[in-house]
Image (cartoon, coloured by chain):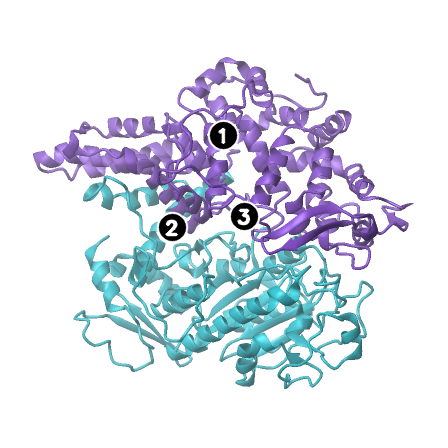
């Protein structure tokens, strides 16, 4: 593993708490016992196991909805369930998490693209998950879903369309207004001309490049003149002097909520260029950075991450289609980001999306509910009830205020048990509610 | 849920128009404490029976709203993607326009009474009707100097009310920090299920609602006190962490602290997804939630919820780089037919004088078409709708002969001037305290 000049790495204790955070940030949370196992590997070993996974298998029962396998190419919402299943069952969580990051980074939506082309793009993103960013960018430029989404096949020598050229610079590689002008947008659009597709009754087909649709005349981009092809156009952007720092900052933001120092950005950018725009070494440096493990720098779990994580924690697979609409109302329906800049990670939680996470939790808890009439028992002891509820989620660590709030709930509820039958029933009912309260607490909604 | 809410909800089901002096709804069997707040000739009915009486926030929210002035409301409707203004009000007889738009130019439409060069797109007849009634102020070329052609930068400027990439609160959020209360999340509501950046406050809480008739909380396998104590429990946990130094914890805490308040306030409007209100006007039927959300919003106002600002995205995408002639007309139709129904709903309920609707988009589109669509432009079109709106054009149509050096429409009004007028004349807030870089930008006359 690289020891990176200029990028500090975490030197503190790497225990279960740190391993848990790493699994949430670089994956979808721990399965029971997984955080303890990861902690044994130490920081570097743990990171290594994520960035160079020994297995990419899916383990556990295949997903089934209403007794039938999923139809991800055809049925509404099954694409979401298909990917969520991978997140739940994968032995290579960072590969799936990076695929999710690229889906957000190169945000494409089935609002304008057939579902089967979205799945084809998803395979492309997974192939490049920890690969090379320049090759990913070249591939996504000619990806049919992207060609439709940002009008790449409407961009031709006769009627240039700026959409992709603008977002390639603004959102994917350089940042708004950083090192390019409106003229560069228009000139780069000309370099990217030439792609085409046909339309049939069943949708778009035959995606291809046609020389006659390409503007072969000279262009001037970033002050350089040339008869740039589409590949040369893309590489002008990925080799632009402003790209490496943009890349480092943006990638950092997916794992750590506070801004990196200027020196850290510089060092990460240098590492990126030195490794020929490979993603893995930069991810490894970020995952080892002390800021990832610092107190007071929690991140709200994205809705699909929390959903997959709760299923992992409780050992459940995809057995209902509900996860699709639950994630949707929580604000993250896969294959349908709100726009080309992806999901807004700074605003996951408000009163409506809090309620959506409550509903999501309700669906996780429902089949496991305890019923005093079917023999479930629990003691008249507030602390013990809280302990049982926290154990349901694999014993996540809780802050003082959250624990105090849970114990107060338990005590208030037990205090109303003024008859013997209530003293038998209420503790059990309280555990059911406490499970809900744990998973919707500020501590569990964040990592 | 407490049974008193159900009785209460039934009492306000299918709420008819509320006019000052109107008799109480017959046959409810409920002694309704109807609190008619009259200001500027407006009636606001507050149903204070049962559960709501136990809600300090609700009462104090209304009290604050009363103290803060005339209980005005702004509905902020965003057309996401950049509406092509030259297709909404089109200079159809202009030869340059026809040359720039060989495929997309409009050929005809109802004349626009304030500028004989322009005609309305046939899909916005609803808006033309409202304009003819004197209820629409048109901004035919609204924007700002040095227009940014990035969706996200330009939209951000409009949302924060300043040309400042780093500002983190919304312009309406800063209004609410001044006219609102620390315990009233309903003062600013996002109606499409996620917090709108325009409403982001620094201090006071705001809320997001997906469907007003569906905001219950239920725990599987719990009933009696174990269930009843659940909402107070997450509310307490949220409150105990409000203002936490970790921003992620603070965000989660705020959502948890106020979700219960929102549930209680919405209880009269419906239960388990079944609305207990009926619209007072006919809304378009659509698979898109937009008309339903507007109808729910009118019912929320009629139920007396202490709302000052609300935000909602219009249906569809307006980023018409391709196939504009196919996608844009149906989105225009649904958007403005729905807004007409909303206006009629407010009028029938006697609420119209309290509400203005602002319709905006992050920019207009390039004057020259690109084949089957149009690329990003500069100045765009905006509308201020309501019975109190002046109904007079703000700025003028600059024509397509004098485009800027990138081939885009020049702005003849600045959105910050419009915001300034809304701050001062609609919310009674000092515009200088809300809009950091609007000094010296003229404020248009927006009210009759």
Which disc, if any, is residue B258? 2
**Which residue is identified by label 1?**
A24
- Residue at point 30%, 71% (across, down): B14
Q: Which chain is cyan?
A: B
Quarter of the image containing the N terminus of chain A? top right
Query: Gap between marks 1 and 2, in whole Å?
Result: 27 Å
Residue B56: quarter of image: bottom left
Q: Nearer the viewer, mark 3 or mark 2?
A: 3
Along the viewing direction, whichever of B18 and A338 lies nearer the viewer: A338
**Which residue is identified by label 3?**
A336
Query: Gap between marks 3 and 1, in whole Å?
Result: 22 Å
Chain bearing tag 2 is B
Chain bearing tag 1 is A
**Element marked by disc 1:** helix
In the displayed structure image, the side of residue B309 where residue A219 appears, left or right: right
Along the viewing direction, whichever of B177 and A298 lies nearer the viewer: A298
């Amino acid at each position: 593993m690289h020891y990176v000049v200029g990028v500090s790495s975490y030197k503190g204790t790497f225990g279960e708490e740190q391993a848990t955070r790493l699994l949430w940030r670089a994956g979808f949370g721990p399965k029971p016992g997984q955080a303890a196992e990861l902690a044994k590997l130490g920081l570097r070993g743990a990171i290594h196991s994520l960035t160079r996974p020994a297995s990419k298998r899916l383990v556990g029962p295949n997903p089934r909805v209403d007794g039938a396998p999923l139809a991800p190419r055809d049925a509404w919402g099954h694409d979401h369930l298909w990917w969520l299943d991978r997140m739940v069952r994968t032995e290579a969580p960072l590969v799936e998490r990076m695929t999710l990051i690229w889906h957000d980074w190169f945000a494409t939506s089935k609002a304008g693209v057939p579902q089967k082309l979205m799945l084809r793009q998803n395979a492309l993103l997974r192939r490049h998950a920890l690969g090379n960013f320049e090759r990913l960018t070249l591939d996504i430029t000619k990806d049919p879903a992207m060609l439709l989404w940002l009008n790449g096949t409407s961009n031709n020598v006769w009627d240039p369309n700026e959409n992709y050229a603008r977002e390639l610079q603004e959102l994917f590689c350089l940042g708004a207004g950083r090192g390019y002008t409106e003229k560069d947008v228009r000139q780069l659009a000309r370099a990217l001309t030439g792609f085409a597709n046909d339309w049939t009754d069943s949708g778009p087909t035959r995606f291809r490049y046609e020389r006659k649709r390409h503007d072969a005349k000279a262009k001037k981009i970033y002050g350089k003149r040339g008869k740039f092809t589409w590949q040369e156009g893309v590489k002008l952007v990925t080799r632009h002097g402003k790209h490496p720092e943009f890349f480092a900052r943006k990638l950092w933001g997916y794992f750590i909520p506070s801004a990196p120092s200027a020196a850290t950005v510089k060092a990460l950018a240098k590492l990126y260029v030195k490794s020929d725009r490979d993603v893995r070494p930069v991810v490894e440096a970020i995952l080892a950075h002390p800021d990832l493990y610092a107190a007071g720098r929690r991140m709200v779990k994205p809705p699909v991450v929390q959903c997959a994580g709760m299923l992992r924690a409780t050992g459940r697979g995809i057995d209902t289609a509900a996860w699709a609409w639950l994630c949707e109302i929580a604000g993250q329906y896969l294959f349908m980001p709100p726009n080309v800049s992806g999901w807004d990670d700074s605003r996951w939680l408000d009163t409506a999306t809090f309620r959506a996470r409550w509903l999501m939790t309700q669906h996780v808890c429902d089949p496991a509910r305890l019923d005093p009439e079917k023999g479930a028992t629990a003691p008249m002891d507030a602390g013990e009830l809280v302990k049982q509820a926290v154990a349901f989620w694999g014993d996540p660590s809780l802050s003082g205020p959250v624990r105090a709030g849970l114990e107060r709930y338990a005590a208030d509820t037990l205090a109303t048990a003024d008859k013997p039958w209530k003293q038998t029933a209420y503790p059990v009912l309280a555990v059911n509610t406490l499970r809900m309260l744990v998973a919707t607490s500020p501590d569990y909604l964040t990592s | 849920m407490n049974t008193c809410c159900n009785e209460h909800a039934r009492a306000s089901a299918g709420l008819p128009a509320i006019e000052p002096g109107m008799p109480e709804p017959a046959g409810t069997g409920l002694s309704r404490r109807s609190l008619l707040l009259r200001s500027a000739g407006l009636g606001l009915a507050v149903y204070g029976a049962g559960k709501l009486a136990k809600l300090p926030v609700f009462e104090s929210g209304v009290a604050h709203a009363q103290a803060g002035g005339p209980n005005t409301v702004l509905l902020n409707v965003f057309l996401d993607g950049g509406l092509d203004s030259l297709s909404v009000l089109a200079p159809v007889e202009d030869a340059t326009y026809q040359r720039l738009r060989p495929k997309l130019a409009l050929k005809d439409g109802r004349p626009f009474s304030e500028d004989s060069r322009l005609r309305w797109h046939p899909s916005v007849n609803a808006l033309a009707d409202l304009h003819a009634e004197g209820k629409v102020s048109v901004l035919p070329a609204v924007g700002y100097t040095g227009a940014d052609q990035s969706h996200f930068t330009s939209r951000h400027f409009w949302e924060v009310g300043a040309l400042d990439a780093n500002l983190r609160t919304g312009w309406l959020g800063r209004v609410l920090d001044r006219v609102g209360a620390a315990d009233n999340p309903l003062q600013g509501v996002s109606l499409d299920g996620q917090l709108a950046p325009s409403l982001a406050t620094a201090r006071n809480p705001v809320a997001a609602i997906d469907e007003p008739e569906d905001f219950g909380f239920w725990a599987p396998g719990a009933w009696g006190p174990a269930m009843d104590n659940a909402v107070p429990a997450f509310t307490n946990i949220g409150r105990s962490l409000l203002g936490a130094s970790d921003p992620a914890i603070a965000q989660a805490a705020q959502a948890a602290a106020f979700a219960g308040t929102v549930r209680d306030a919405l209880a009269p409007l419906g239960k388990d997804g079944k609305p207990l209100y009926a619209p007072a006007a006919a809304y378009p039927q659509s698979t898109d939630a937009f008309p339903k959300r507007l109808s729910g919003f009118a019912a929320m106002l009629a139920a007396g919820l202490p709302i000052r600002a609300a935000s909602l995205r219009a249906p569809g995408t307006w980023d018409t780089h391709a196939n504009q002639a196919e996608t844009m007309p149906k989105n225009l139709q649904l958007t403005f037919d729905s807004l007409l129904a909303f206006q009629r709903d407010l009028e029938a309920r006697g609420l119209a004088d309290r509400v203005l609707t602002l319709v905006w988009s992050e920019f207009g589109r390039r004057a020259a078409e690109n084949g089957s669509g149009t690329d990003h432009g500069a100045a765009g079109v905006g509308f201020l709708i309501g019975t109190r709106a002046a109904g007079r054009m703000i700025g003028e149509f600059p024509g397509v002969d004098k485009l800027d050096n990138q081939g885009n429409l020049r702005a003849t009004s600045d959105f910050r001037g419009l915001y300034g007028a809304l701050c001062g004349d609609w919310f009674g807030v000092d515009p200088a305290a809300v809009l950091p870089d609007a000094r010296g930008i003229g404020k248009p006359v927006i009210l009759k």
